[in-house]
Amino acid sequence: MKPDFKKMDLIPAIVQDFYTKEVLMLAYVNEESYKYMIEKRETYFYSRSRKKIWHKGETSGHFQKIKSITLDCDCDTLLIQVEQLGSACHTNNYSCFFNKVSEYENDIDNFIIEKVFNMINDRKNNPKEGSYTNYLLDQGIDKICKKVGEEAAETIIAAKNSNKDDLIGEISDLVYHVLVLMFEKNINVREIKNKLAQRHKIEGNKKIEHQKGEY
């Protein structure tokens, strides 16, 4: 099955982060750019203003590695799930959808871990003056490991005290520094989630018997 380009020359494409499910951008695809995407497994769109095909990330380095392409019921809209390298928006925001109009609920962001990790990746590709993340990455693995150790010790000390807010803050700092360590060692959040899933195996609603290496 493929888009119905006989119905319309340009098909709207919703681009979504494969890991966080955050909507990153809306673009348009013609038959030629669609063929490029299938062949290259990266996003190619048709620019309505420039009247030509463009390869996302060609000038910025913020490529989109395609994980899946899904058609809607009428075969005239695409949902493209991608691994986003850097920022999706030309403004250097991660998503093009950052101008909040209204908010009806103030839910916790369930993908904040992935977003912090993506921010670390973006700092590597697009250094920002005064960025603490860039400072850590520039200093290298020894400095990063030292900070992880310091934050782990501070977490332990906070746990021995009675201030819950202090402990939450220290755990948050520890998680951030561990994410920097993961990035430095080329480990992504998905790999950690996969390992946690392996060690906490569930069959239906029933846990499998404990084995060595499992939780």
Image (tube, helix red, strand yellow):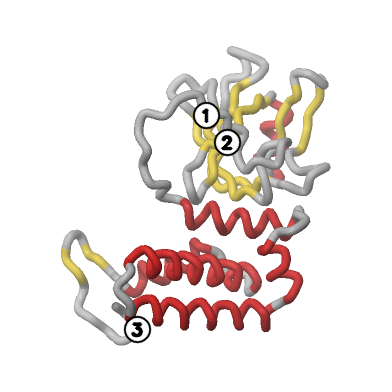
Foreground residue among 164 and 182: 164
**Residue visible at 67% across and 51% down in the picture:** 85
Residue with the mark numbered 2? 15
Pointer 3 or 1: first along the chain: 1
Disc 2 versus disc 1: distance between alpha carbons? 19 Å
> Which residue occupies 47% across, 52% down?
112
Badge 2: residue crowd in 10 Å (few <14, some 14–19, many ≥20): many
Query: Residue 92 occupies which quadrant of the picture?
Result: top right
Q: Position of residue 86 (x, y in %)?
A: 68, 50
Amino acid on which the number 1 mark rests in the picture: Lys
Farthest-out residue, left:
206
Secondary structure under the numbered disc 1 in the rendered image: loop
| Residue 184 percent location from the top left of the image | 65, 71
Instruction: Using a 10 Å C-alpha cutoff, classify the residue at mark 3 as few (fewer than 14 neighbours), some (14 to 19) or many (20 or more).
Output: few
Q: Is residue 135 above or below residue 9?
A: below
Give the numbered dot on residue 100: 1
Three-letter amino acid code at the position of disc 2: Val
For the residues bearing labels 2 and 3, Cβ distance under 8 angstroms: no
Residue carrying label 3: 213
